[in-house]
Image: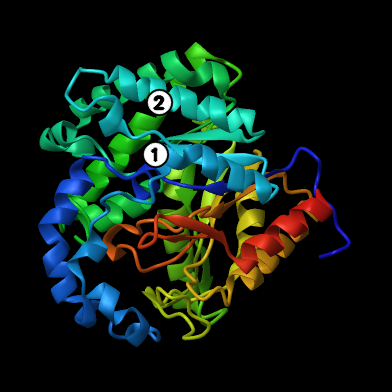
Amino acid sequence: MDKADFPKEFYWGASTASYQVEGGAHNQWTVWELAHAAEFAKTAEKRLGWLPNWEHIKKRAEDPNNYVSGKGVDHFNRYDEDFGIAKSLNLNAFRFGIEWSRLEPEEGQWNQEAIEHYRRYIKAMKKRGLEPFLNIWHWTVPTWFDAKGGFKKHQNIKYFTRLVGKIAEEYVDDLTYVITLNEPNVFTSFGYVTGEWPPQEHSYWSLIRVYINLVSAHRQAYKILKATKPSLQIGVAAQLANIQAKRPHDVLDELSTKVMRYLWNWWFLRRIRKQQDFVGFNYYFTDYYKTFKRENPHVPLSDLGWYMEPEGLYPLLLRVWARYKKPIFITENGVADEQDQYRQWWLQESIIALQRAMSEGVDVRGYFHWSLLDNFEWAYGWWPKFGLVEVDRAHGMKRTVRPSGKWFADYIKKHS
């Protein structure tokens, strides 16, 4: 991997989500986490006791405060410091979110102070030499929108497109890249089938309705954004998995692999293929299917118990390119690794996967690591650590670049 350089215009970045780092938000997820924090703490061992690092995380996982986002990592106030850290890591791009509940806390009432905050935020990013990649929606919504039924009702899409119109009006002059939606397949699966996330439904009918409405939401957002600034490059951040047959050439395993690839990876992207200028996707998982049941190897595992196969990014890149022939951005890619044992290896294997795909003609334009900072990991809370930068929330939110982050910075400097 030391022999190949990346193009000068290649984007090396890190990703964040507004709710996971900013702190001080109030939306449907805030309400939900406060209502369930005690329950999550009480059931922690039942849910997480199988993890290899259970004894290490036990105290935190059984503390209700673990499941409350609270002050986040204070990125809302310390963003310029964080942009400086990103630049010190030799990054030249940054993926971020705008929190809808800040811009429109009450239906139809725009918060001018919040609007100006994000304007300063984007300008500070550009001043640091970081290309802004704006992500409009990353799962959280205002409480008033949730009370109306959220994306489950088709008539509610108009509220989302109104937000998109406001963002277009206020910010697109400073933007080249916009991501409309983050991982719609994950949001619908966990919120409407498994019931692990709000609104905790168990209904395939609800999943289908929400999924279809999110397709429509993206299409309409694309139209609004393009009308405002035709040169904008617009896409989504899909969650794609490298899905493989557990037993190659077994008829049922191969069939289940094809079905799962289509439903998980391609269904959404196929329906927006004419309304995307690039294909953005998040990669964390290689999943092996045996007769429609996922059956992954037991090692190596991340802190979250996820099977790790970073090199699986390579075949996935080939499949995405073969289907869409559009520029590709890896919009998220990372590993939960508090002790920083695996992150450098994960980065190395991911970079090799990029190099292999690019050497075969795949048009990859950028790689965004998840995440710049340790952050609030949704229903898991604070104990999983994804950051290139450690954040000590108990001691003034102190930021410390992990060794893997230093390695990544050095690699980018040498090979860009």
Q: Is residue 26 left or right of residue 358?
A: left
Q: Is residue 330 left or right of residue 413?
A: left
Identify residue for label 2: 117
Find numbered disc 2 in the image and state the secondary structure of the residue it sits on: helix
User: How many residues crowd mark 2 within 10 Å: few (<14), some (14–19), many (20+)?
Assistant: some
Q: Earlier in the sequence, mark 2 or mark 1?
A: 1
Of residues 85 and 231, the one nearer the viewer is 85
Q: Amino acid at mark 1?
A: Phe
Q: Amino acid at mark 2?
A: His
Judge whether residue 207 can be spotted in this image. Answer: yes
User: How many residues crowd mark 1 within 10 Å: few (<14), some (14–19), many (20+)?
Assistant: some
Of residues 327 and 10, the one nearer the viewer is 10
The quadrant of the picture occupied by the N terminus is bottom right
Identify residue for label 1: 76
What is the distance, in whole Å, between disc 2 and disc 1 at their CAs? 9 Å
Q: Is residue 290 left or right of residue 42?
A: right
- Measuring from the top left, give residue 86's x and y in whole percent: 60, 46
Judge whether residue 200 can be spotted in this image. Answer: no
Q: Is residue 280 left or right of residue 145?
A: right
Residue contact between numbered discs 2 and 1, judged by CB atoms under 8 Å: yes
- Measuring from the top left, give residue 305's x and y in whole percent: 41, 77
Residue 147 occupies which quadrant of the picture? top left
- Measuring from the top left, give residue 109's x and y in whole percent: 21, 17
